[in-house]
Amino acid sequence: MLLLLGVLASAARVVINWDVGYVQVNRDGSSGSRRAIGVNGSLQIPPVFATKGGTLVLNVHNSLDVSTSIHAHGIFQNGTNFMDSPAMTVPSLYSTLMLDAPLYSNEAVYGPQTHAIVLKHLEYIELVIKNPSILLHPMHPHDHAFQIIEYDSIVNQSEPVLRYSTKCNAPMQRDTFVVPVNHYVKLRFRADNPGVWLLHCHMDVHFGMGMALTLIEAPDVLRRRPKVPETMLELCRAQGIRTEGNGAGNAGFDLAGLPTPPTIKP
Ligand SMILES: *[C@@H]1O[C@H](CO)[C@@H](O)[C@H](O)[C@H]1NC(C)=O
Ligand SMILES: *[C@@H]1O[C@H](CO)[C@@H](O)[C@H](O)[C@H]1NC(C)=O
Ligand SMILES: *[C@@H]1O[C@H](CO)[C@@H](O)[C@H](O)[C@H]1NC(C)=O
């Protein structure tokens, strides 16, 4: 679940109570609704407003019959790797917007830690995620709901347990999907949402170790759209985050000075 923060210029201490439970939703447009996880009875989680320098206390009650995890995007989380993004000097979105053509379409300029993949506008993408590790991984894309079209153990790809053909009208859509131990999942989506989006493991400890990739989706279309608001650039300046150049804040393919990647812990 994603926590979005707005800024309000009053109380320094904000206490919020969330009740995480099941809700019925219909996101696929197919007949009938299905069970999803929401906050206080809604899939759309309530906005949270806090003051710069203030204290936010978020009490979360889990009404589900299973454990769940909640993490915040864009907030400094002590003990983790630079907020919740790959360790870059320049956030990839700014490199996409500010670099000259055709550099922004070259995955190498974003730096190896982003695992950037450049997608052409309106292409259909099939992505296979294999998990040969000893832990399951809940994978979470930003700004797409992927269709799950295949799923099976890694050793049996010829006859997957789940396989949808292009003729099937409604493969399930998910914005988080668990890839079990020794299994793979094949996903399909259309690159119809120009932007710079993360796809990452939703276990924060894995994310912090770098288990994420960056989709640079339709950068040519993205660059023709409205520019980054000045307030966002101000926020970056206030935090000393650079907004020009490649992933290392340099020209061309020079990645000198990139931060060191996070340490992989056992
Ligand atoms: C969510 O519900 C709890 C009670 O279950 C309530 O105390 C709380 O104020 C609600 N939070 C929001 C943000 O509406
Ligand atoms: C982060 O945590 C460490 C260890 O608890 C502490 O020394 C440090 O001051 C914290 N940093 C911030 C910015 O809160
Ligand atoms: C592989 O697929 C075949 C055919 O569907 C099935 O009979 C077999 O049990 C599967 N093997 C494994 C290891 O899942």
Image (tube, grey):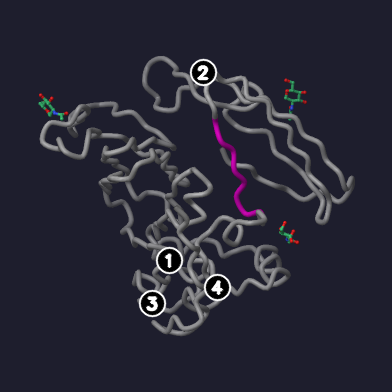
Q: Which dot, 3 or 4, sits closer to the camera? A: 4
- Provide the residue designation for mark 4: 89
**Do the CB atoms of the residues marked 3 and 4 lie less than 8 Å apart?**
no
**Identity of the residue furthest to the top in this view:** 32
Q: Residue at x 78, y 44 (%)?
A: 56
| Mark 2 crowdedness (10 Å alpha carbons): few <14, some 14-19, many ≥20 | some
In-image side of 140 versus 127 (left or right): right
Depth check: give the residue in front, 191 or 181: 181
The disc label shown at residue 24, or none: 2
Depth check: give the residue in front, 46 or 114: 114
Secondary structure of the residue carrying numbered label 3:
loop
**Do the CB atoms of the residues marked 3 and 1 lie less than 8 Å apart?**
no
| Earlier sequence position, callout 1 versus callout 4 | 4
Depth check: give the residue in front, 169 or 59: 59
Q: Which dot, 4 or 2, sits closer to the camera? A: 4
In-image side of 176 versus 7 (left or right): left
| Earlier sequence position, callout 4 versus callout 2 | 2
Between the residue at mark 3 and the residue at mark 1, the CA separation in whole angstroms equals 22 Å
Q: Residue at x 77, y 34 (%)?
A: 16
Between the residue at mark 3 and the residue at mark 4, the CA separation in whole angstroms equals 20 Å
For the record, the magenta segment spans 68-75
Residue 207, position as x, y percentages in the image:
49, 52
Secondary structure of the residue carrying numbered label 2:
strand
| Earlier sequence position, callout 3 versus callout 4 | 4
Q: Quadrant of residue 39?
A: top right
The disc label shown at residue 113, or none: 1
Secondary structure of the residue carrying numbered label 4:
loop
